[in-house]
Image (spheres, rainbow, N blue to C red):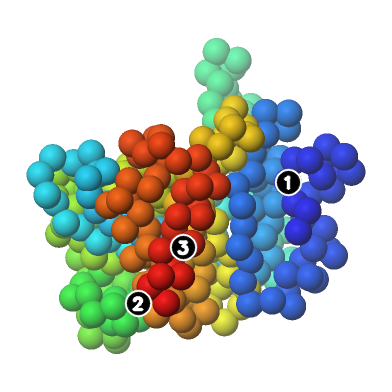
Amino acid sequence: MDLGSDRYLRTGELLTDEDIAFMRKHQAVYFGAIGDPRVAPGVLEKGILIKMRTTFDQYVNVRPSKAWHPYTPLKGEKNFDILFLRENTEDLYMGAGGVLKGLDAEARMSLKRELYTVDLELRSKASSEQEFAFEIGMMSRRGIERFADYCFETAKRLNRPKVTAVDKANVCTELYGLWRDVFDRRSKQHGIPVEYMFVDAMAMALVRAPERFGVVACPNMFGDILTDIGAEIMGGLGVAASGNISPGGVSMFEPVHGSAPDIAGQGKANPIAAILAGKLMIDQLGRQDLGNMIEWAVKMAMKQKKVTADMGGTLNTVQAGNAIAELVRQSG
């Protein structure tokens, strides 16, 4: 599909109704990286990526973090295999201007009027020297319930003994109090223990002892931050893949990194993150046997140094991709 900055600069179009209708006919979207210094920050991200996630209700973000030796920067032979699951549609990223699910139009307008009134009252009491800004995080019981169910079902499917739920309930008591209440209830229903970690403690633990974690459940904003730590400890954005999951619907898979326009066309880009995003997609479509084959080929390419310069190899982008494809063919 012709999506991204070139089309936007040419036609002014981002994600159109026709694009969405075409995607609905398929089981998954395999998405490339976007981003362009010619376009203002946020235009492509909101107009394409976030619109896609919202339109298809892709409420789970999946980010694996595995120890890719010898590329992990952690000292010692730490072997970790973490699956970060991030709630993808609520929390602080939703904001006061977001869509409130479960409320009818009148209730939504009433809430917005109340928030606007509070805003005006606060602004009237502050001088220019006392300028302030605020964001409002919102989470729904229904949104947390369906996300928690996905987390516990995933832990059961992967034979992981527990789910680690991350929050900041010692400060944001209302928002993450609801989060903990739901996870407590769903833990009992699924028969799988849940442990809680404050996000600051979790950030430290990921660097010191990542091997102690398996399935990690995060609210939207904390998940955005922690998964980048997860990417770095396994070897960097060049090997970081992501899935935006709509269970039973259209899911989207992409590399975590951006488009790196400064090296476009030079053959320097590392193709592994995009390849591993394809592995996530194939897993989600029910062919984990083929996904395992792709992951094995990536590991062999790393072992044989059939990689790009950022990983110590001598191959260009196309050569590195072809090497992994050939290893897949050999394994089949």
The residue mark sitting in front, 3 or 2, is 3
Disc marking residue 154: 2
Give x and y (percent) for residue 61: 47, 61
Q: Residue 241 sits in which quadrant?
A: bottom left
Q: Which mark is residue 4?
A: 1
Question: Is label 3 in contact with label 2 (beta carbons under 8 Å)?
Answer: no
Q: Is residue 178 above or below residue 15?
A: below
Q: Residues within 10 Å of mark 1 (few under 14, many from 20)?
A: many
Measure how far apart labels 2 and 1 are at the Cα level. 33 Å
Residue 307, percent across and down?
40, 45
Horizontal side of 94 relative to 73 (left or right) equals right
- For the C terminus, the image quarter is bottom left
Q: Amino acid at mark 3?
A: Glu
Foreground residue, 153 or 157?
Answer: 157
Q: CA distance from mark 3 to mark 2?
A: 31 Å
Left or right, 214 with reference to 253: left
Of the residues shown, which amino acid type is indicated by label 2? Answer: Thr
Residue tagged 3: 326
Q: Residues within 10 Å of mark 2 (few under 14, many from 20)?
A: some
